[in-house]
Amino acid sequence: MGSAIGGLYTPILSLFTFMLLGLQLYRQNQVDHHNQISWFIDRSLEGGEKALKYMAEISLEKNMENQTVIDGLLSTINDGTPEDVASYLGMPVNQRFFSAATIYFSNLEGLKSSKNLNAQLACEELRTEAAMLLGYNMMIIIEREVLRGMLAHGPYFDNESLSSERKP
């Protein structure tokens, strides 16, 4: 009689064990996926914030014409052509500003392209920080004039081009 119960008990126990192993693997996969998304969001936020602070620091530095980078950029945009803006951004101090702007917007692009809601919220957080630090209008100018056509998921700040795209 004991062997009959043991013969029935062993397959049920092994089936239960395999079910628990399958559930554990499923849960571990969910945790790994969550950790990967969290790492991506943290890294994008950190990189975007660093680039934004660097952009703010560089924007106040003086260039060869003894102007701040932002004042020189604004006057070049106002008085020049897109080629003049590109050549202005090729100067050493201005090149660092352009690099910081590119890094900032590439982090925005990465967050915006994610389908994860937390990444979308992090994108909005990064946009808000930029608007507070450099000003919303300045970010529109940087996005429109400096990063002319480089953004796949933008515009992020330029509401005029957003509303003009929606009009038939």
Image (cartoon, grey):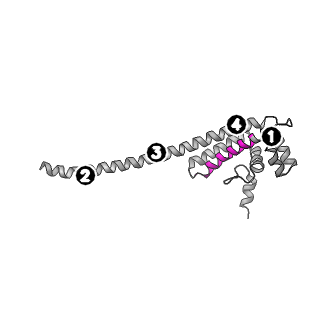
Residue 112, position as x, y percentages in the image:
62, 50
Q: Earlier in the sequence, mark 3 or mark 4?
A: 3
Determine whether label 3 and label 4 are within 8 Å by CB: no
Q: How many marks?
A: 4
Q: Which residue is mark 3?
A: 31
Span highlighted in magenta in the image: 96-114
Q: Is 22 contained in the magenta span?
A: no
Q: Earlier in the sequence, mark 2 or mark 3?
A: 2
Q: Earlier in the sequence, mark 1 or mark 2?
A: 2
The residue at 72%/43% (across/down) is 99
Q: Amino acid at mark 1?
A: Ile
Frontmost residue, 92 versus 99: 92
Q: Which residue is mark 2?
A: 12
Q: Is residue 104 above or below residue 66?
A: below
Q: Badge 4 local density, few (<14 within 10 Å), some, or many (20+)? A: some
Q: Is 109 contained in the magenta span?
A: yes
Q: Amino acid at mark 4?
A: Lys
Q: How far is disc 1 from disc 4 in space, using C-alphas?
A: 14 Å
Q: Earlier in the sequence, mark 4 or mark 2?
A: 2
The residue at 60%/46% (across/down) is 121
Residue 9, position as x, y percentages in the image:
21, 50
Q: Which residue is mark 1?
A: 70
Q: Earlier in the sequence, mark 1 or mark 4?
A: 4
Q: Which residue is mark 4?
A: 53
Q: Badge 1 local density, few (<14 within 10 Å), some, or many (20+)? A: many
Tell me the element at label 2: helix
